[in-house]
Amino acid sequence: MTLTLFTAPKPFTDPHIATIQRNAIRNWLRLEGVDVLLVGDEPGLAETAAEFGVAHLRDVERNEWGTPLIPSIFALAREHSDAPILAYVNADMLFLPDFVEAAQQVATQAERFLMVGQRWDLDVTAELDFASGWAARLRERVAREGLLHPPAGSDYFIFPRDAFTEMPAFAIGRAGWDNWMIYRARALGWPVVDGTPSILAIHQNHDYSHLPGGRPHYDLEESHRNTALAGGERHMYTLFECSHVLREGRLRPAPLTLPRLLRRLELWLLPPTGKARGLRRFLLRRVRRTRRRLTA
C-alpha cells in the first residue's frame, strides 16, 4: 500500500451521519493504493467495518468525557500500517484519485512534511454512486453545487509514518489539535504544504447534533483544553501558515498574499498569555475582521 488512511468516526446512530460516513468509507475504498483503518468503538462502527471488510481498531484511549485521544489514534494507525505515508482524515470527507497522487508527489520532494488544504462543502443527504465514472461525476457536482470553505479548519493531514510520534493528549473532534499539527510541523522546520490547488477535498455538510448539547465544538470545555495543551492561541496555526503549496506536481513557496500578511499581524498582536485588552484588542479585532472579509 502507498498510503494508509485512518479516521475515528462518529457514532452511526444518527441516520444522516451514518449515511455520509458510509459514503466516505465506500469512497476511500475506491482509491488505488490506499488501506483504510477505522479507529474507535462508537455505536455501529464494528458492524460497518465488518460490512465493508475494513480493519477496525477498537482499543483507543479516551479522556474523562469518553472522547478518543489523538495520540492513541495515531499510534494505533502506525502500529497497524506498513505504508510509508499516513493520512488522518475526518470521517465525512470524500476524495478523488488526486489525493493519493498529491501525497506521492510531496513524498518524493520532502523527507518530512505535513500536507493540509481547504475543503469544498457539499450538501449530501443520500448514498452516493461509486460505480464506474464516479470521480468525474463527483467533480462535476462539486463544480455545480460546492462552496470552497475559508482557509481555517483542516480536514485531512498527510505525513510520513515516522512523523508526529509524540503529541499532547488532544481530544478528537474538538478544536485546537489540527492547528497544533501545523504549528508543530512549522516549528520543526518541515514543509507545511497547502494541497488545495492539487486536491479536491469534499466535505459532506452536517449539523452538530452529535456533540454535547448540540453545540459547535469551539464552545466545548474539551476544545479549551486542546487549545491549552497546544500552547495557547499563538499556536493556533491555520492554512495561512503553510510554507509551501503543491501546484502542478511541484512544491513551491507559498505566495505572500494580503490575507497571509494580515494573519502574521494577527498572530503578532496576540498576547503571550491571557486575552488581548485595550488597543491590542481593538487592533486584533480589526485585523481579524478584515482578513475574514477578504477570504470569505
Image: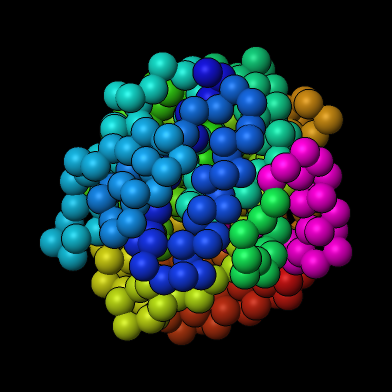
Q: Is residue 121 left or right of residue 176?
A: right
Give the residue drawn at x 79%, y 58%: 142
Residue 34 locus on image (x, y percent):
55, 27
Q: Is residue 144 magenta?
A: yes
Give the residue drawn at x 57%, y 39%: 28
Asked if residue 235 shows in the view, the reply is: no
Residue 282 locus on image (x, y percent):
55, 82
Q: Is residue 93 left or right of residue 47?
A: right
Residue 81 drawn above or below residue 137: above
Residue 40 locus on image (x, y percent):
28, 47
Asked if residue 285 shows in the view, the reply is: yes
* Quadrant of residue 289 within the rendered picture: bottom right
Structure colour scheme: rainbow
Q: Is residue 47 magenta?
A: no
* Quadrant of residue 181 within the rendered picture: top left
Bounds of the magenta segment: 130-153
Q: Quadrant of the C terminus?
A: bottom right
Question: How many labels sit on residues?
Answer: 0
Give the residue drawn at x 86%, y 64%: 144
- Of residue 118 and residue 61, the one placed in the foreground of this image is 61
Q: Is residue 216 left or right of residue 23?
A: left
Give the residue drawn at x 52%, y 62%: 19
